[in-house]
Amino acid sequence: MNKIKVVVAGPRGKMGSEALRMIEKEEELELVACIDRNYDGFKVQDIEGLPPFEALVYSDINECFQSIDADVLVDLTTPEVGYQHTKTAIQYGIRPVVGTTGFTKEQLDELSDLAEEKGIGAVIAPNFAIGAVLMMQFAKWAAKYFPDVEIVERHHDQKLDAPSGTAVKTAQLIQEVRTSKEQGHPDEKETLTGARGAELDGMRIHSMRLPGLVAHQEVVFGSTGENLTIKHDSFHRSSFMTGVKLAIDKVVTLDLLVYGLENLME
Ligand SMILES: NC(=O)C1=CN([C@@H]2O[C@H](COP(=O)(O)OP(=O)(O)OC[C@H]3O[C@@H](n4cnc5c(N)ncnc54)[C@H](OP(=O)(O)O)[C@@H]3O)[C@@H](O)[C@H]2O)C=CC1
Ligand SMILES: O=C(O)C1=N[C@H](C(=O)O)C[C@H](O)C1
């Protein structure tokens, strides 16, 4: 059996370390290297808390891709670094699977164009939890009937981007089917800036950050005399790993960039 050769960027992070534990259990996957700014030249097994892989760690992504034979880059870092990593991977013909959130629309468009130009598969998924993907799809369905909607996302307080990638993706999916409208009272005024949350096409997105949380979202629809709430909770980062594995399996068969795991689920 030909294993899929995987590089993980951000291996000491909350998601990156979970991805290593997933790869350790999956027979068809082989970890061939990691990218980490602090441990150049180390073996993964020499970094405290990480599984006993012999794979080498590189600080420089170019050096990594010039030195090893890899099929897929899994990026779980930060918006700025993840964007650069994704671009570099496509340029080297290594297929990126990106969980990192916070990319701008312009960056996503640019990466999509680059992948198409090079004929390289790529997956960028704001949320790899199957339940979260379903939550977004159910919300899209409901928005056909309920155009008044607010999104409330709650995350741990170490998160760098707000709103979450999932909240933005949910709003974009809703936008595809919802009749565009401004919500709330036409004369409403914020007496404290930000009280009504972020705004996307008239929809409001509220972001909470608290210790103890992992990743949670409610999509609340309102209509005459009724409310509908669609809710998803990730209580542990293992919830994202089924989707990461699915994306790795599928990306090697693609020749363009796919944004959102729903496009890979049958
Ligand atoms: N798509 C999905 O399903 C999910 C996506 N995410 C996203 O994944 C990303 C990572 O999340 P999480 O694991 O919680 O974050 P962490 O902060 O725990 O991990 C981030 C990792 O990136 C590394 N990093 C940070 N800055 C740099 C840099 N300049 N160069 C190289 N490496 C760097 C960190 O290393 P260092 O210690 O050196 O800073 C760390 O290993 C986020 O964008 C988050 O939103 C999270 C959960 C699910
Ligand atoms: O940073 C996180 O933790 C998460 N980030 C992703 C997002 O921004 O939507 C996915 C999930 O919500 C966890």
Image (cartoon, grey):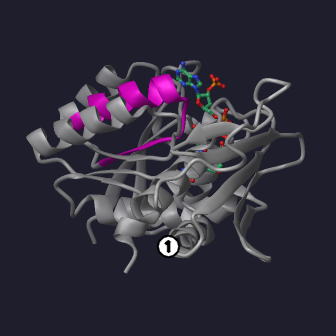
Residue shown at 16% from the left, 55% from the top: 255
Image quadrant in which you'd find residue 249: bottom left
Q: Across the whole image, how many numbered discs are drawn on residues?
A: 1
Q: With respect to residue 68, does 40 lie above or below? A: above
Question: Quarter of the image containing the C terminus?
Answer: bottom left
Residue shown at 66% from the left, 46% from the top: 204
Neighbour tally class for label 1: few under 14, some 14-19, many 20 plus, Cα within 10 Å = some
Residue nearest the observer in this picture, 23 or 126: 126
Residue 202: x and y, percent?
57, 45
Tell me: 227 left or right of 29: right
Q: Does the magenta stretch include residue 234?
A: no
Amino acid on which disc 1 is placed: Lys
Q: Magenta residues: mostly which secondary structure?
A: helix
Residue shown at 62% from the left, 71% from the top: 131
Question: Quarter of the image containing the N terminus?
Answer: bottom left
* Res 52 visible: no
Image quadrant in which you'd find residue 198: top right
Q: With respect to residue 240, does 18 lie above or below? A: above
Tell me: 198 left or right of 225: left
Q: Name the residue under label 1.
A: 144
* Res 86 visible: yes
Q: Which residue reaches farthest front?
A: 187
Q: With respect to residue 82, does 126 lie above or below? A: below
Q: Which residue reaches farthest bottom?
A: 266
First to last magenta residue range:
72-90
Residue nearest the observer in this picture, 130 or 110: 110
Dot 1: element: loop
Tell me: 220 left or right of 39: right
Q: Does the magenta stretch include residue 85?
A: yes
